[in-house]
């Protein structure tokens, strides 16, 4: 069966689910007529139907017609939704994709026997530059793997890790855009202090992050790039000296580690 023949249902249709829908729609992977959604607020359901050109329906209908169900509710709604899915005797062969942060595969297995993929997408999926981190439940079929890869590749890159590495992946990829945006903003403010307009300085800083990231994604190693950039006694080296003296790299690592720890704490609530 081709991906364009599948029916997809979104349970929860907030910010993240809408980003995912837009990417799938832009890539024309699944026709709108085969996509349904449900959310709690009937007014927002009607607004979303008009805005996105897809139909809202009851949970029962959505589960009956969709071979792929994407859970996009907040983590505190997970138990409620999963109980409902179990009560409605959701067919066991259907595939479940969950984007809920911090909810472990074991939690889904308490309610469902279905194949489950835990995905941590990030906000850059909105511009096709997302980093989605995957962890599958036991024995994912080839069909499930290839469908989910196709679905998330249209939003950027996909990396699979074991579930024990989802918390640190949240620190790097899931919440990472937030940390990088703070650094871009800090760089832009430094330019503004020296007389650049905020708009020019922000563009300069953002493009500099994007360019440096592309060099690494092309395959250049950070170590070799850094030796090319930093001429002894030059301008970059002057900056590196401050980075070294203030242990900036270690501080930044502790930011990522704090996020990972919080993700671990949150997931302990859902066992
Ligand atoms: N935002 C991100 O950058 C990001 C990144 C990675 C992962 N995530 C994960 O994505 C999930 C959703 O986040 P979000 O930012 O998209 O949240 P959101 O905008 O609040 O969306 C949540 C959606 O779930 C719906 N919902 C809540 N309870 C429901 C229920 N019982 N049945 C059906 N629909 C229900 C809400 O509908 P109503 O508004 O109509 O109540 C809303 O459409 C979270 O679990 C989060 O961990 C988000």
Image (cartoon, rainbow, N blue to C red):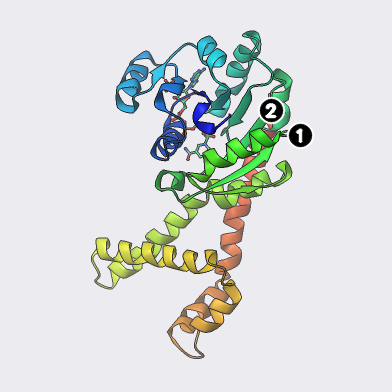
Give the image location of residue 95, x and y in percent. 63, 26
- Measuring 53% from the left and 15% from the top, which residue is drawn there? 65
Mark 2, secondary structure of its residue: loop
CA distance separating discs 2 and 1: 8 Å
Give the image location of residue 178, x and y in percent. 47, 50
Pointer 1 residue: 139
Q: List the single residue furthest toward the bottom.
A: 233
Give the image location of residue 236, x and y in percent. 46, 81
- Measuring 55% from the left and 72% from the top, which residue is drawn there? 246
Give the image location of residue 18, x and y in percent. 42, 32
On the rendered structure, is 89 left or right of 23?
A: right
Q: Is residue 271 visible?
A: no
Label 2: few (<14), some (14–19) or many (≥20) C-alpha neighbours in 10 Å: many
Kindly check if marks 2 and 1 are in contact, taking CB atoms under 8 A apart as contact. yes
Query: From the viewer's perspective, is residue 261 above or below residue 22?
Result: below
Mark 1, secondary structure of its residue: loop
- Measuring 57% from the left and 25% from the top, which residue is drawn there? 68
Please name whichever residue, 190 or 118, is drawn nearer the observer in this view of the structure. 118
Query: From the viewer's perspective, is residue 211 above or below residue 261?
Result: below
On the rendered structure, is 269 left or right of 120?
A: right
Query: From the viewer's perspective, is residue 234 above or below residue 163?
Result: below
- Measuring 59% from the left and 30% from the top, which residue is drawn there? 97
């Amino acid at each position: 069966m081709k991906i364009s023949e599948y029916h997809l249902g979104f349970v929860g249709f907030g910010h993240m689910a809408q980003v995912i829908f837009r990417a799938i729609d832009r890539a024309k992977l699944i026709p709108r007529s085969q996509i349904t959604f449900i959310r709690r607020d009937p007014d927002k359901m009607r607004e979303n139907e008009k805005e996105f050109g897809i139909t809202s329906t009851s949970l029962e209908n959505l589960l009956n017609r969709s071979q792929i169900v994407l859970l996009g509710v907040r983590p505190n709604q997970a138990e409620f939704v999963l109980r409902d899915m179990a009560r409605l005797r959701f067919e066991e062969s259907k595939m479940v994709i969950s984007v809920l942060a911090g909810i472990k595969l074991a939690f889904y297995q308490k309610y469902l026997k279905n194949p489950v993929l835990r995905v941590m997408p990030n906000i850059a999926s909105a511009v096709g530059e997302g980093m989605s981190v995957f962890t599958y439940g036991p024995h994912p079929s080839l069909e499930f793997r290839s469908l989910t890869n196709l679905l998330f590749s249209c939003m950027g890159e996909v990396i699979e890790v074991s579930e024990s590495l989802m918390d640190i992946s949240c620190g790097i990829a899931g919440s990472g855009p937030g940390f990088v945006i703070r650094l871009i903003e800090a760089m832009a403010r430094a330019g503004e202090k020296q007389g650049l307009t905020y708009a020019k300085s922000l563009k300069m800083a953002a493009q500099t992050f994007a360019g440096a990231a592309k060099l690494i994604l092309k395959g250049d190693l950070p170590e070799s790039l850094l030796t090319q950039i930093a001429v002894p006694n030059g301008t970059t080296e002057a900056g590196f000296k401050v980075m070294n003296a203030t242990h900036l790299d270690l501080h930044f690592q502790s930011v990522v580690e704090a996020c990972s720890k919080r993700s671990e704490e949150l997931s302990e609530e859902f066992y």
